């Protein structure tokens, strides 16, 4: 890759590695619906004008139903589940659980009966390795409060939503501009959750830390990150850009340990390695060897999750 591509790769890796830290900070003063609406509202205010000027929304006129479904499975559900989950588990564990997304993509593809996604050979081995890794991350890391198992389950459901969204994008929206998809889903999610956010809004202004976290999530982790990611795809190609899946969880874990002093156990790290290996193997195409799960990055993710 060129020097510019490497700089973009580093930038996006950081911007998609820090959301879990800032979500953890924001939920100290704000309810999860408020955090999600503020984040997507800021991102929509930045991305929607750009999408309108570039004409990126025109291709979506005949796919309104698909956009609504994608919003619910890729933004509304996962963003809420991750934010609620982080009220019970550390941000570092959240990042490790979201990294299970490629394995879940393989499972969903297996259930969908898609012939192009047949799981056999090394992909079947990868799926087994990934599932063992998931068990390792969840089963041997008791971090969190007394509802940590609930929190972990919510985050895994979010990862499942990301996986379903990846297949939805791959099958129905692969030929439309990603900027239009992201701008429309961010806007629609803001409108859907706005009434809930107003009902759960605090009676007083949040602290400076929570307010700053919201700004970072909306401006940098969502709007700026996606714009930079599109430039990275143009500079280095979608296949290389998808390698961010392996970088941002590591950054999230390091930040959680260094900034929030969260515990980090070797068992969870071992499970994380198995998840990465299993995810890479289980989402490979039989001939091309490309990562199937990269399609979810083209439409938005999961971490800013995407979270």
Image (cartoon, rainbow, N blue to C red):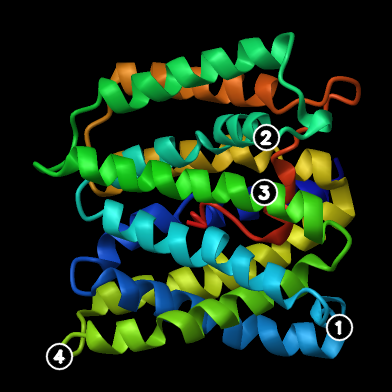
* Viewer-nearest of discs 2 and 4: 2
* SS at mark 3 in the image: helix
Which mark is drawn over residue 109?
2
| Pair 4/3: label in front | 3
Could you tell me which residue is drawn at 79 percent across and 39 percent down?
A: 240
Cα distance between the residues tagged 1 and 4: 41 Å
Residue at numbered disc 1 = 58
Residue for badge 3:
166
The reply to whether the C-beta atoms of the residues labelled 1 and 3 are less than 8 Å apart is no
Quadrant holding the N terminus: top right
Give the residue displayed 32% in from the left and 78% down from the top: 34
The answer to which of marks 4 and 3 sits earlier in the sequence is 3
Give the alpha-carbon distance from disc 2 to disc 4, as whole Å.
46 Å
Q: Residue at x 45, y 75 (%)?
A: 39
Mark 4 = which residue?
204
Provide the secondary structure element on which disc 4 rests.
Answer: loop
Between 207 and 268, which is closer to the camera in this rendering?
A: 268
The answer to which of marks 3 and 2 sits earlier in the sequence is 2
Q: Quadrant of residue 82?
A: bottom left
Q: Nearer the viewer, mark 1 or mark 4?
A: 1
């Amino acid at each position: 890759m060129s020097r510019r591509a490497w700089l973009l790769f580093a930038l996006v890796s950081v911007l998609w590695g820090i959301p879990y830290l800032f979500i953890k900070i924001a939920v100290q003063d704000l309810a999860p619906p408020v955090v999600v609406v503020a984040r997507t509202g800021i991102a929509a205010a930045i991305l929607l004008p750009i999408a309108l000027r570039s004409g990126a929304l025109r291709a979506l006129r005949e796919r309104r139903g698909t956009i609504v479904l994608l919003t619910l499975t890729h933004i509304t559900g996962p963003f809420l589940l991750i934010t609620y989950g982080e009220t019970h588990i550390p941000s570092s564990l959240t990042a490790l659980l979201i990294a299970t997304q490629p394995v879940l993509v393989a499972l969903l593809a297996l259930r969908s009966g898609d012939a192009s996604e047949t799981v056999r050979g090394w992909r079947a081995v990868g799926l087994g390795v990934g599932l063992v890794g998931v068990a390792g991350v969840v089963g041997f890391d008791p971090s969190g409060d007394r509802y940590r198992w609930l929190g972990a389950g919510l985050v895994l459901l979010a990862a499942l939503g990301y996986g379903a969204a990846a297949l939805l994008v791959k099958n129905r929206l692969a030929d439309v501009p990603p900027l239009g998809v992201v701008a429309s889903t961010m806007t629609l999610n803001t409108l859907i959750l706005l009434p809930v956010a107003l009902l759960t809004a605090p009676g007083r202004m949040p602290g400076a830390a929570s307010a700053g976290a919201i700004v970072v999530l909306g401006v940098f982790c969502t709007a700026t990150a996606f714009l930079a990611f599109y430039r990275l795809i143009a500079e280095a190609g979608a296949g290389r850009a998808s390698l961010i899946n392996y970088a941002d969880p590591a950054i999230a874990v390091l930040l959680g340990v260094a900034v929030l002093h969260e515990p980090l156990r070797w068992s969870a790290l071992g499970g994380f390695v198995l998840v990465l290996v299993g995810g890479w193997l289980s989402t490979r195409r039989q001939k091309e060897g490309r990562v199937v799960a990269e399609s979810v990055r083209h439409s938005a993710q999961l971490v800013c999750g995407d979270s």
